[in-house]
Amino acid sequence: MKRLIPAGVLLCFVIAVYLFSFNYINKSCDKTLNLLNETVETYKTGETAQDAAKKLKKYWDKEEIVLSLFINHNHIDDIEKAISSLNVYAKEKNNVIFYEYADEIKILLHQIIEDSKIGAHSIF
């Protein structure tokens, strides 16, 4: 019986940390997707999207510090590389490679969200 109370407290702590991380990951990924969509829309108008891409990079650099506690570092590094490449091509106009990196970022963010959901894949 003495071990049941600490085990219950520990279980509650683990569940609370999971809920916090899940909410934080979803909030960060949603905001990143919104900034990415804003960057793509700016780029579609025929203008350079350099300012919007810098805003996206600045936000991701801030968020990746906390996200690295909850997410595999390889996923974070892949997104950071894609955002950096997106910044390079945001300076140009009508470059197809810009859209390829934007799609890659969307796919990687979707993968992070799916991996953070509770399920057989994330448990085992």
Image: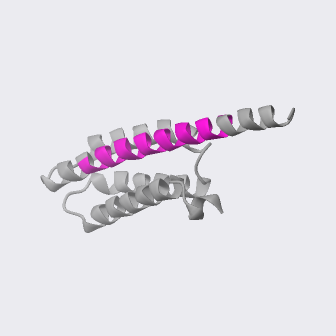
Q: Is residue 81 visible?
A: no
Query: Does residue 122 appear to the left or right of 46 in the view shown?
Result: right
> In the rendered view, does 3 fall on the left or right side of 40?
right
**Can I make out residue 6 in this image?**
yes
Residue lying at 66% horizontally and 63% vertically, measured from the top left:
124
User: Residue 3: image x %, image y %?
Assistant: 85, 36
Q: Position of residue 58 (x, y in %)?
A: 41, 38
Magenta segment includes 21 = yes
Quick one: which residue is furthest to the left in this view?
45
Q: Which residues are magenta?
A: 13-37
Q: Which quadrant of the figure has residue 35?
A: top left
Q: Residue at x 28, y 63 (%)?
A: 99
Q: Is residue 74 left or right of residue 106?
A: right
Most frequent secondary structure within the magenta stretch:
helix
**115 or 47: nearer the viewer:** 115
Q: Residue at x 47, y 40 (%)?
A: 23
Left or right of residue 86: residue 60: right
Image quarter of residue 92: bottom left
